Image: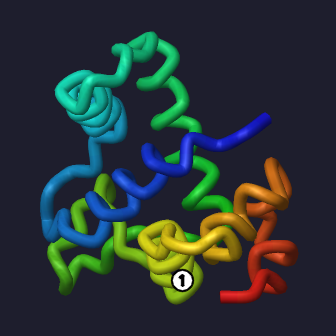
Amino acid sequence: MTYDWDLMLRLLREVQHSGSETFTPRQYADEHALALEQAGQPMPNLDALKAEAQNYESLLFEGGFIESRPEELGGNGENFILTERGQRLLAMLEDDGAVTSPRQHLVDKGEAALVPEVFDGLPD
């Protein structure tokens, strides 16, 4: 299994900027697919992409990359904030320049990249 790191990046950015808005990964997958199409890439299977986004939400939450937004910060039980681990993942995904970029370390680890113990040991 390989992750769609661009979709993952999109979800993390939505968490970062969501405020008190409900987190809607399926909608973000739709928007991600449209952006790909507008960039000249083939339209992915929307149903599969939406399911993947939903799975990523669970994976990010269970892995400690996101957590429920506290009520005092606009939490409604359906929105999140980035944890320190999530902020680090976001930074790694945004830094996609050189061959040895932090994103490449994630790619190299494959499915294990988001296992907390493996992720925490990756270089930045």
Give the residue furthest to the front.
Answer: 98
At mark 1, the secondary structure is helix
**Total numbered badges shown on the rendered structure:** 1
- The residue sitting at 19% across, 82% down in the picture is 73
110 left or right of 47 in image = right
Quadrant housing the C terminus: bottom right
Q: In the visual, does 55 lie left or right of 120?
A: left
Q: Residue at x 35, y 23 (%)?
A: 41
Return the x and y of residue 10 as percentages of the image width and height. 35, 52
Specify whether 66 is left or right of 20: right
> Which residue is pictured at 54% across the width and 83% down the height?
88
In this picture, residue 108 sits left or right of residue 89: right
Give whichever of 20, 65 is nearer the camera: 65
Position above or below: 46 against 10: above
The amino acid pointed to by label 1 is Arg
Q: From what the image shows, is residue 6 above or below residue 72?
A: above
Front-most of residues 73 and 82: 82
Residue 2 location in percent, x, y?
A: 73, 39
Where residue 123 appears, x then y in whole percent?
Answer: 74, 87
Where's the N terminus, which quadrant? top right
User: What residue sits 28% from the left and 38% below the top?
Assistant: 28
| Image location of residue 94, percent across then percent down | 42, 70
Label 1: few (<14), some or many (≥20) within 10 Å? Answer: some
**Colour scheme shown:** rainbow
Q: Quadrant of residue 4?
A: top right
Q: Which residue is mark 1?
A: 88
Vertical comparison of 34 with 68: above or below: above
